Amino acid sequence: FAGLGDLTVSDYAGNFPISSIATGGVTDPKGRTMVYSATGLPAGELAIDASTGVISGTYDAGIPIEPFTVTVTARATGSAKSVSKTFVLSIRNDG
């Protein structure tokens, strides 16, 4: 998660796709597959792919635009240990 920091996405035309926010890149020294999860994403709008850590979806401009505090967690399959990173996702309406 070293390169993951606060970010702002701009909305120019109402509803807009967030094609990908790459959060992955965590590796396990034993080579096990990583599983990603996220909390704090706009409900029903954005989701994280559990196998890649990519956040994507379409944000509805009718929902109040506000910053979201998002926590992404990566855990190696079969391990109880995990690593997490929290960042602020801001969505702006520039339209």
Image: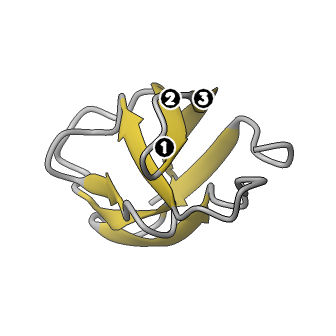
Taking depth in this image into account, of 92 and 29 the one nearest to the observer is 29
Tell me the element at label 1: strand
In the rendered image, residue 21, in percent from the top left (x then y), is placed at 57, 62
Query: Taking 19 as reference, is 57 left or right?
Result: left
Q: Sort mark 1 into few (<14), some (14-19) or many (20+) by Cα contacts within 10 Å.
A: some
Which residue in the protein does label 2 denote? Answer: 71
Q: Sort mark 2 into few (<14), some (14-19) or many (20+) by Cα contacts within 10 Å.
A: some
Q: Residue at x 70, y 53 (%)?
A: 28
Q: Earlier in the sequence, mark 2 or mark 1?
A: 2
Kindly check if marks 3 and 2 are in contact, taking CB atoms under 8 A apart as contact. Answer: yes
Query: Taking 84 as reference, is 4 left or right?
Result: right
Q: Earlier in the sequence, mark 1 or mark 3?
A: 3
* Above-or-below relation of 80 to 13: above
Which residue in the protein does label 3 denote? Answer: 84
Number of numbered callouts drawn: 3
Taking depth in this image into account, of 26 and 69 the one nearest to the observer is 26
Taking depth in this image into account, of 57 and 36 the one nearest to the observer is 36
| Label at residue 91 | 1
| Kind of residue at badge 3 | Ser
The answer to which image quadrant residue 66 occupies is: top left
Q: Earlier in the sequence, mark 3 or mark 2?
A: 2
Q: Whole-Å distance between the Cαs marked 1 and 3?
A: 22 Å
In the rendered image, residue 86, in percent from the top left (x then y), is placed at 61, 25
Mark 3 or mark 2, whichever is nearer to me: 3
Mark 2 or mark 1, whichever is nearer to me: 2
Mark 1 or mark 3, whichever is nearer to me: 3
